[in-house]
Image (tube, rainbow, N blue to C red):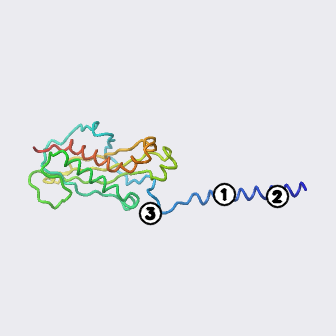
Amino acid sequence: MNLNRNTCNNILAITCILFMFSACVSGTSQPPVSEREEPSTPVSTGVSGVEKIELASIETISVEAPLKAKYDNIVIDDFKSTDQIQSDYPHAVIDCKSRIIGQLKSKNAYKNVTDDPGKTLTGKSVIVNLSVSDIRIAGGAARFWGGAFAGNSYMDVLVEIQDVATKEVVYKKILSTSNNAWGAAWTGGSTDHSLPADLGVLIGEYIYKTVPANN
């Protein structure tokens, strides 16, 4: 009787171990990005030798060395990202760019703020080229289940300002912002989703303080 009981216990234990092993293996697989809300892993294109500036709020933005020349027009031209970034974060570039333009226009300082490089403009102009150099936005599911342990979200954008007349790049920085993981968890992930737009406002303000208006 004891032998049969021990045999049954051994079989039960082995069955439990096999079940747990199977669950662990199946739990490591993830559906494609298209089936998830957003990935939580960083995507980086890598930029070396360029100063990175962390932007926290409009009130704290300061520029040590604004451009000496004054300009009438700002053209927001290219906003590059990789195919992976476009796939993983399809709205990031769109939201960021629209807020950059909106923030610059709200200043009423320049004759024109446009994203049309073919537009005929009078006066001195700069072209602003942008590219996403690094990004990580915690997905809704990751934030819901992991809370603060899903980590913070961040976005880095390489900003190049070029004088149209001389074709010279007169300013080049990486502008970045990030959220607080605990704050994001408290707000249910709202600061994760709004981060690209929030960075757009900050970049717009930074450009305004870097490029003096000819008025």
Q: Residue at point 41% right, 47% down?
A: 153
- The correct choice, above or below, for 128 with respect to 31 in the image is above
Residue 206 is tagged as: none
Q: Nearer the viewer, mark 1 or mark 3?
A: 3
Q: Which residue in the protein does label 2 denote?
A: 8
The reply to whether dot 1 and dot 3 touch (C-beta < 8 Å) is: no
Q: Which residue in the protein does label 1 denote?
A: 21
- The correct choice, above or below, for 28 with respect to 183 in the image is below
Q: CA distance from mark 1 to mark 3?
A: 28 Å
Q: Amino acid at mark 1?
A: Phe
Instruction: Please state the total of marks drawn on the protein image.
Output: 3
Q: Is residue 163 left or right of residue 138?
A: left
Q: Residue at point 22% right, 54% down?
A: 76
**Residue positioned most to the right:** 1
> Which image quarter is the C terminus in?
top left
Along the line of sight, which residue is nearer the eye, 131 or 113? 113
Q: Count neighbours of disc 2 (C-alpha within 10 A) and say few if under 14, some if 14 to 19, many if 20 or more.
A: few
Q: Count neighbours of disc 3 (C-alpha within 10 A) and say few if under 14, some if 14 to 19, many if 20 or more.
A: few
Tag 1 secondary structure: helix
**Residue 130, how many percent across, how many down?**
28, 53
The reply to whether dot 2 and dot 1 touch (C-beta < 8 Å) is: no
**Residue 135, how many percent across, how many down?**
39, 51
Q: Which residue in the protein does label 3 denote?
A: 34
Q: Count neighbours of disc 1 (C-alpha within 10 A) and say few if under 14, some if 14 to 19, many if 20 or more.
A: few
Tag 3 secondary structure: helix
Q: Residue at point 61% right, 59% down?
A: 25
Label whose residue precedes the other's in the sequence (3 or 2): 2
**Residue 95, how many percent across, how many down?**
31, 54
Q: CA distance from mark 3 to mark 2?
A: 46 Å
**Residue positioned most to the front:** 187
Q: Nearer the viewer, mark 2 or mark 1?
A: 2
